[in-house]
Image (cartoon, rainbow, N blue to C red):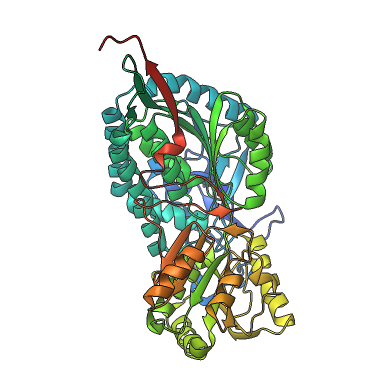
Amino acid sequence: MRKWAWLNLNWVGITIDADRLKPTESGRSFCTDLWVEEQPAARTPLHTHFCTHTLSVVMSSLCVLRTRLPAAMQRRFSLDVSAPLLRTQGYIDGRWVSAASVFPVLDPATGEEIARVSDCGPAEAKQAVDAAYRAFHSWKLRSAKDRSVVLRKWFDLLTLHKEDLARLITFECGKPLQESRGEIAYSASFLEWFSEEARRVYGDVVPSPARDRKILLLKQPTGVASIITPWNFPSAMITRKVGAALAAGCTVVVKPAEDTPLSALALAELAEQAGVPAGVFNVVPCSREKTPSVGQVLCTDPLVAKISFTGSTATGKVLLKMAADTVKKASMELGGHAPFIVFDSADVEMAVSGAMNSKFRNSGQTCVCSNRFLVQSKIHDVFVEKLSRAMDAELVLGHGSEPSTTQGPLINNRAAEKVEAQISDAVSRGAKVLRGGKRLDGSFVQPTLLTDVSTDMICTREETFGPLLPVIRFDTEEEALAIANASNVGLAGYFFSQDVSQIWRVAEALEVGMVGVNEGLLSTPEATFGGVKQSGLGREGSKYGVDEYLEVKYMCFGGLKL
């Protein structure tokens, strides 16, 4: 006798067999539900079947997608990742921990459910903090070389599993697979960099004013660090922080974004394989509903000595207020609103290439994406024409796993609605749409080019986080700088010029923490990452990144007979 089980279409990784239909007596529509014939090996919950089993799935020929997507999307996509890396439980004190409930992780390109992850709450967060505190007392005593070796092994494992890790990013974050591969390389590079920096945490011997004493400045790890990361770089934002923390001798509790917990949990699996001791690296995934209570624990618990957060300026301010009562050390990488200036002397082809890289990477969803494009009058029309052609030739919407895709979806409908509202506002105030301008089905938005943009439009005053490129015409260098600096944030800025004197003037005058000169991509582990104004506090990456997790202790060694 055949056994049948009900399966919701939100689950992915299924093999369609339209010839084996089973009618339903329950009234469920074939458009949202499937019946599957259980195979002998199917002994685990069906919602995780895609990582361990192949099921023969029944689907009505009447079943259609709930929303119309780009042409490349009119088929099903499956997440094919090796079982050990597809983790759905929290990771606390070296153990995989289930919570009382779960929350769904969705593919932003299709809206389909790809996994259900343990929904940790304040109790699990407290357990993770306690575990990290216990582990800190032994981890900080490990030699710098020992910590270096562990981080290097972790780097090697990320490199070994780069394809599976990239697919996780594409399916939970939506970015094209080629970009996801780039993120894994970027993510691994921080582990490599900080494995080397672990052995270069130097103190100082300071000349003493007295002959009978020596002055030493020692660098010691801060303690337990709460690491709160965003969804747009779900792997790299963790390793950039955690690599530095572990190199310094700190232990960590990671709270990944609710949209993208799978990458963080895969990192935990590889950390364990690399020999990171229990309690040193903990991951507490949670839903949007439980984020405030989990965040409260991570930012107020007296055992936490340090907070590192990447996200919006508004959220950063809330976390800083919570951390203030116990005076925790804090690093904040917050919102950006990057200007991109093209001067008359610029190499136009180079500027267009820089604009494409800076604006449309991850569909415009990066904190260092250019948001306001300022183009000098003499070169304006040529730049816009060449940029339009480049957009036509290079940008392809679709599911991130399609080889031809260069533009995936935005992370969710709220993100798409924000871009849609900014386009509508700009057009209502006189902007012209040269390319795109429309929201498509789901969270897809056409890459959009606007001209005749003025500084009273919302897109020039607020960070977009989407594929919207507004062009403002300007006449003088002073005018461009005034517009570029008229913001309360200052993370990154870019400009293109062949005038050496102008390059020095503008680079020093831009009120940002990072400047790209004739370059649209500037992130690298060897250099500092961080901003000024309300774009945050502290720096990540580079030799200075470890300092965020260190305290300087002054030791006066007196009574010497010299």
Rendered position, 17 above or below 186: below
Residue 208 or 50: which is nearer the viewer? 208
The part of the image, by quadrant, that contains residue 457 is: bottom right
Residue 334 or 65: which is nearer the viewer? 334
Residue 204 or 265: which is nearer the viewer? 204
Q: Relative to 124, is 222 on the left or the right?
A: left
Rendered position, 195 above or below 136: below
Residue at (36% x, 39% y) in the render: 270
Q: Position of residue 122 (x, y in %)?
A: 64, 30
Q: Position of residue 150 (x, y in %)?
A: 30, 33
Residue 104 or 276: which is nearer the viewer? 276
Q: Position of residue 350 (x, y in %)?
A: 38, 78
Residue at (49% x, 52% y) in the render: 530
Q: Relative to 85, is 224 on the left or the right?
A: right
The part of the image, by quadrant, that contains residue 520 is: bottom left
Label tally: 0
Residue at (42% x, 35% y) in the render: 245
Q: Is residue 14 visible?
A: no
Q: Is residue 170 visible?
A: yes
Q: Relative to 8, is 527 on the left or the right?
A: left
Q: Quadrant of the C terminus?
A: top left
